[in-house]
Image (cartoon, rainbow, N blue to C red):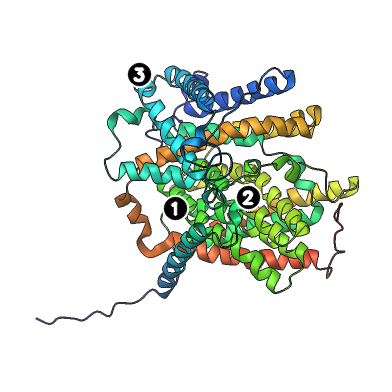
Amino acid sequence: MKTTLRKKQIDFSLVISWVLLLSAVIVVVYLIIADPFNLSSKPYGAGDYYYTDLEGFQDIFLGETRIPMEKKHLLLFTLIFVGWSVFSCYLFLWLEKSKK
Amino acid sequence: MSNLVTPEKSNIVTADKFSFSDLFRKEDWWAIWLGFFIMAIALMGKVSGSFDLKAVKAHKWGTGDYPSLISAFDGLGSQLLFLLVFVGIITVIGMAVMRKDVKGYIVAFPVVFVLANLAYLFSQHYVIKNYLGYAFWALGIGLLISNTVGTPKWLKPAVRTEYYIKTGLVLLGAEILFSNVIKFGLYGLGIAWLVTPIVVIFMWNYGTKILKMTSKPMVIVIAMATSVCGVSAAIAAAAAAKAKKEDLTFAVGLTLIFTVIMMVSMPLILSAIGMDPMLGGAWMGGTIDATGAVVLAGEAMGPLAGQVAAMVKMIQNVLIGIIAFAIAVFFATRVDRNEGDPAVGASEIWHRFPKFILGFIGASVIFSLLVEPSLGTDVTGSILKLTKGFRGWFFCLAFISIGLESNFKDMSQYLQGGGPLKLYVVGQSFNLVLTLLVAWLLLSGVLFPIPQLAGF
């Protein structure tokens, strides 16, 4: 009976991804334990997921507009926003159709 | 495997005709009623000035006024009891009208609430607070229980992931204020909105075509977490796409880990290479996932970088609503369809569409177009300060539930081939490159005048 030796192919991208993930976990654990940059003294951080989770979010996010816009620019803003949204939807759907 | 939303288990109708009793018998609608009830009470209390509907959690402990773990609950006993009773009553009313196991829920809910309390307690340690939030601890506690002693049968009536998450999302809708989209003008629109859909489309195609990941909801959840704003976006996408609990768990886990790395490393590297603060802030705002991490990283580069980072991330926070709506429509009309099936008609789209999204969008529209213009930004912010507490609690309860319903054996099947990991790494890399390119084109003065921010 012949035995066939099969060469195991290494998925390098998977290996790299796992190395990255494990390295990231080790680094995160170190950062939490050692707190080398004294981030614990800050009022907010990565544990605040959404803008209202931050202490003093009203001052940070709900203050005055930083770049005042004229009415004509507001119209342009709206047109670009809507236009790009519609274009993105069509692009997404077109790519979905083209792969079938 | 259990889904975040499973057609056979959930109350989302996909085949039956709509009847008005659905408004009271279906979980999606109850999420809307509960969310709007809490918003209405918070609004009445703030406008009348007679009471504040607060959802308290453990104090930040380990230092200062609250040095020990036990001291984290100082002065909060009665308020936590009120919270337990209030949330318990409003949710049990929904359970009763939906004809669920009310007795079982009344017994089990206080225990799930206590577990959520524990998650908040651990997350409020003064060091841990700025690295990992309640989602990590809630998932961890739930997974620990389910994979060691096992989730007891008597606890399961209150393990209601969909119920909690949808209610939380309706409350999140109120925090999405359209007025914040324009704060950084056309520059912010370009950095936050031009890039985000491209990254989502790239990651979707990379995940489904190249990596051939079989779980399409997982692809979109990871894409949203990466390109928009981390945990909150992942939750919205998971509910809109009817993702499995494991999909959300992986997306949240990946985003939490890499957010910490980016929060610490990006300002260090950008300051070391002398990057312009406005450009650096925009880059970090568009790429770091958690909003708190964005602001912290931005401010590490200086006040201008912090302000720009916050504004860019703010736009992405607002865009969650629009993208979640689009995902819900897409998954209702295209993904659930088999090859060769006829096109889905409007009534079928309505039946499949997750109705709580209407509450999510509705809350945003009401607060953006009615509440903020009539009461002003300060009062609106004060109301949101109250509702966000309840939103956090519902999400925490949801993550506890996800943990209690998940097991490592099921989750390990998703790790085969490392698809989620590869998708996140490649997608985030693409996000970093594209955001930097667009930010540079808009803010360097090459194509457009460099913006002058008020106050700087």
Can residue B350 be seen here? The reply is no
Q: Which residue is mark 3?
A: B103
Comparing A29 with A22, the one in front is A29
Total labels: the figure holds: 3
- Up/down of B451 relative to A83, above or below: below
Q: Which residue is mark 1?
A: B250
- Residue furthest to the left: A1
Residue at disc 3, secondary structure = helix
Across and down, in percent, residue A9 comes to 33, 77
Q: Which residue is mark 2?
A: B292
Can residue B178 be seen here? The reply is yes
Residue at 41% of width from left, 75% of height from top? A12
**Is circle 2 on the same chain as circle 3?**
yes
N-terminal of the two: label 1 or label 2?
1
Quarter holding the N terminus of chain B is top left
Q: Is B202 positioned to the left or the right of B399 in the image?
A: right
Comparing B247 with B73, the one in front is B73
**Residue type of the residue flagged with mark 3:** Lys
Across and down, in percent, residue B152 comes to 28, 33
**Is circle 3 on the same chain as circle 1?**
yes
